[in-house]
Image (spheres, helix red, strand yellow):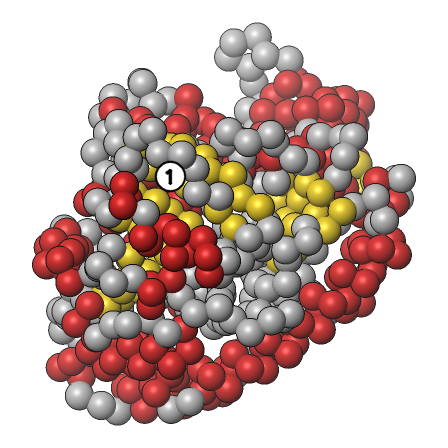
């Protein structure tokens, strides 16, 4: 009997060239397959008897190898079900790449960038993948019609090189939407369409920050921002947050950039109060600092009316507003945007031409129609109702199945909710979570200077209510 769809078996070295034992060579085969992405978390390995036949080794050898791989954390064995891969390739690749920075001769900035570990998003929505919208609820038939309509237009516009700021019709639609929904003051000539909010943050970091410059970030902080600014060689200062958002500290050194998520602080969910917004904008010592407002999922507020953007209060052209369509529409769209102060537009356009020039025009054209024809607003309203029901289900069932978890008092928006736990390591516990079929994004690694709290960021938006209940039941059982 031969196993099926196991092309990774060609990695097996039947003969040792360095004295490596047979058991270790079987282990190496599985490790290589995981590192190369041939095997992913949740994939089932062949039964020991089947793999022994495939590799022409004894079943005892395979059992010993599986036991060693389980001890190393590569696999998990479930009685009556089989042996399953317990990890994905990305973390392994990051660690390997970070360990090779000196050997491959990177620049100082390149080494700093690689040392951050990068930004890796989950590719599949499972309980409790954070930051994942529900693609099943997207109006795909509308999107198909808009694609067909765009393709019937002038091919010269869609198939040629484009404006580094982005497709004019999309920038016009974004400008109108931001003014109406977020109170952002802008015009199409100040909007730059990017492939993601992460690209926007990288452009900001590389254009506005020199190595050693002081940058303020919230503590805890969104890891994508931390990665961008550390990669540019900046010196980060973590500013604590409470239920009213970032606490403006005493100013010992004027920051070059201040990064914050005022509408829905990541990850605590706090909203920056109006008093602190005005204090930040009016502080005399900060008049030379750039303020980056990351408004990543302001469309989804469940407990109160959305607070207008910080950018709308700015009287001096110091706020750079960053947004994305990833959360409101779907991740693979790869479209975000920045609203730039007039003084920065020309420099950012020039810098953009050295990267990718502009996002694909077809996706921009379809998104422009989606906004201007009212589909975006309708979709957001529908998703807000759907996600609120799932948010409420999560909050209700947390108390029932996992009473040990303390919910962030500020959380009432977005696609995930943060919970705190005392008396255990969130990272150590998260490594065991895949055995229960769940994914936990840890809170403690997001802190810089403040006392690290243990907890997890629980994504709920892409999960049916019954999936939320059953997954919380498994999580609560593990906690007990």
Q: Position of residue 418 (x, y in %)?
A: 65, 50
Seen from the viewer's position, the closer of residues 211 and 21 is 211
Q: Would you say residue 475 is visible in this rendering?
A: yes
Left or right: 125, with 468 as reference point: left
Question: Which quarter of the rendered picture does the N terminus lie within?
Answer: top right
- Compared to 120, does 149 lie above or below? below
Q: Position of residue 319 (x, y in %)?
A: 29, 57
Left or right: 1, with 121 as reference point: right
Seen from the viewer's position, the closer of residues 151 and 248 is 248
Q: Position of residue 218 (x, y in %)?
A: 46, 42
- Compared to 127, does 40 lie above or below? above
Q: Give the residue pinned by disc 1.
A: 216
Left or right: 11, with 346 as reference point: right
- Compared to 324, does 431 lie above or below? above
Residue visible at 13% across and 58% down?
Answer: 343
Residue visible at 77% across and 25% down?
Answer: 67
Seen from the viewer's position, the closer of residues 160 and 442 is 442
Q: Image quarter for residue 427? A: top right
Q: Position of residue 141 (x, y in %)?
A: 49, 87
Question: Which quarter of the rendered picture does the C terminus lie within?
Answer: top right
| Secondary structure state at the residue bearing disc 1 | strand
Looking at the image, the residue that sits furthest to the top is 19
Q: How many marks?
A: 1
Q: Would you say residue 58 is visible in this rendering?
A: no
Residue visible at 28% across and 72% down?
Answer: 185
């Amino acid at each position: 009997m031969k196993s099926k769809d196991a092309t990774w078996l060609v990695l097996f070295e039947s003969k040792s060239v360095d004295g490596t034992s047979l058991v270790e060579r079987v282990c190496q085969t599985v490790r290589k397959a995981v590192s190369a992405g041939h095997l992913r978390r949740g994939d089932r390995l062949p039964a020991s008897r089947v793999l022994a036949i495939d590799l022409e080794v004894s079943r005892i050898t395979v059992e010993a190898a599986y036991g060693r791989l389980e001890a190393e954390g590569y696999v998990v064995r479930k009685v009556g079900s089989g042996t399953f891969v317990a990890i994905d390739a990305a973390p392994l690749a990051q660690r390997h790449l970070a360990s090779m920075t000196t050997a491959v001769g990177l620049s100082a900035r390149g080494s700093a960038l690689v040392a951050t570990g990068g930004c890796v998003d989950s590719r599949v929505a499972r309980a409790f993948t954070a930051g994942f919208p529900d693609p099943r609820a997207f109006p795909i038939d509308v999107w198909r019609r808009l694609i067909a309509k765009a393709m019937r237009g002038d091919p010269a516009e869609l198939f040629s090189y484009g404006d580094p700021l982005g497709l004019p019709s999309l920038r016009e639609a974004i400008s109108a939407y931001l003014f109406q929904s977020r109170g952002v003051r802008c015009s199409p000539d100040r909007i730059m369409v990017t492939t993601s909010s992460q690209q926007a943050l990288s452009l900001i970091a590389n254009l506005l920050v020199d190595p050693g410059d002081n940058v303020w970030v919230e503590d805890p902080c969104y890891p994508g921002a931390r990665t961008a600014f550390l990669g540019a060689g900046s010196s980060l200062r973590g500013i604590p947050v409470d239920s009213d958002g970032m606490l403006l500290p005493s100013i010992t050194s004027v920051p070059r950039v201040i990064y914050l998520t005022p509408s829905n602080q990541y990850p605590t969910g706090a909203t920056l109060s109006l008093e602190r917004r005005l204090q930040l904008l009016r502080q005399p010592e900060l008049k030379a600092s750039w303020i980056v407002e990351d408004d990543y999922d302001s469309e989804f507020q469940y407990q109160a009316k959305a607070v207008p953007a910080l950018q709308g209060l700015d009287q001096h052209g110091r706020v750079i507003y960053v947004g994305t369509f990833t959360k409101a529409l779907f991740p693979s769209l790869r479209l975000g945007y920045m609203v730039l102060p007039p003084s920065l537009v020309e420099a950012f356009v020039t810098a953009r031409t050295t990267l990718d020039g502009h996002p694909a025009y077809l996706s921009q054209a379809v998104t422009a129609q989606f906004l201007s024809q009212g589909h975006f607003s309708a979709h957001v309203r529908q998703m807000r109702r759907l996600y609120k029901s799932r948010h409420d289900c999560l909050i209700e069932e947390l108390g029932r199945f996992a009473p040990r978890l303390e919910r962030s008092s500020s959380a009432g928006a977005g696609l995930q909710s943060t919970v705190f736990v005392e008396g255990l390591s969130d990272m150590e516990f998260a490594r065991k979570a895949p055995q229960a079929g769940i994914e936990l994004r840890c809170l403690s690694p997001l802190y810089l200077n403040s006392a690290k709290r243990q907890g997890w960021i629980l994504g709920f938006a892409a999960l049916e209510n019954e999936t939320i209940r059953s997954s919380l039941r498994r999580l609560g059982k593990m906690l007990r």
